[in-house]
Amino acid sequence: MPTGALPARRLYDFELLYVCQGEAVTTMYGQRHPIEAGQLIFLPSGVYHQNEVVSRPDAKFLGIHFDFFDELNIQTEADMIVNEARLAPEKFASEGVLDHLPPLSSRTIYTPPVPCVQMMERVVDEFTLRPAGYELVCKGLMLDILIQLLRSRPARTLADSSPHDAKLYELIAQMEQAPAEDWSNKVIAERLMLSLDHAAKLFKQLTGMPPSEYVQSIRHREARRLLRESDLSIEMVGAHVGYADIHYFSRIFRRLEGITATEYRKLSRIL
């Protein structure tokens, strides 16, 4: 999305809107909520809100619309975004609440752990490709995503974080923007001006995985996007995300995805 504000709106369903890159602001309940890369905002059913990209030249998002009790039949955008001229009050979805945990709507901004973001990406892939049984897979993943968010601690601001946290957030943003660069443990430690062991330990505490695994995850995500949305050759896709050896890229992709890069591209374009 380019820099600028979208029209105010409200939803019949719920939305998880994750900022992959850049910065945004959502105005809701009369308050502006800044959202940085790596954070997620929960948009409730029936609540007026306005999203705005404040970073230049743009920002990248991952969004998932859902309901808790299978109340809605969502086929098009018109089924989830309220048309105030033809309001259908009975369509506003209900929020599910668990005993001993506050409702998801008790907080607005979340910092989801990396495995949670990876599950969101998989929901998008399953829903896009729609292989046999994708509905059950999506429901299972969404339940896990919601539980992880409910269990997560409130998002920390940079003002409340240590200097190392601020540097780590900045470094992670750089990784997202340039996954093909050299992100070895040595390079990461040098950029953080820490020892190898200390840098790796802090990185895993913040993201839930070692640096090498995190880099692999963002490279794989970008490779999938390029395979779906570009006509680059498989070799060029691998090089673009940081794998100069086409054979190594192919092995890594098949291990992570379960099918070859060529099969993934064909399947995504057929469906």
Image (tube, helix red, strand yellow):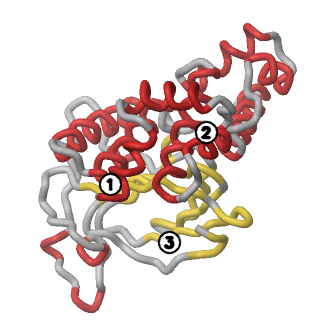
**How far apart are labels 2 and 1 at the CA level?**
22 Å
- Label 3: which secondary element: strand
- The N terminus lies in quadrant: bottom right
Is 41 above or below relative to 160? below
Which residue matches tag 1? 128
Amino acid of disc 2: Gly
Residue 168, position as x, y percentages in the image: 72, 30
Whole-number angstrom distance, CA of label 3 to CA of label 2: 38 Å
Question: Image height check: is 165 above or below 8?
Answer: above
| Disc 1 secondary structure class | helix
Q: Please state if 92 lies on the left or on the right of 106 as rendered.
A: left
Q: Which of label 3 and label 2 is nearer to you? A: 2
Question: Which sits earlier in the primary sequence, circle 2 or circle 1?
Answer: 1
Q: Nearer the viewer, residue 188 or 234?
A: 234
Of badges 1 and 3, the one in the foreground is 1
Q: Find residue 170 and report its horizontal and vertical position in percent.
A: 74, 39
Mark 3 highlights which residue? 50
Label 2, residues with CA under 10 Å away: few <14, some 14-19, many ≥20: many
Tell me which corner region of the image, top left, top right, bottom left or bottom right, holds residue 261. top left
Amino acid bearing label 1: Thr
Is residue 160 visible in this depiction of the protein?
no
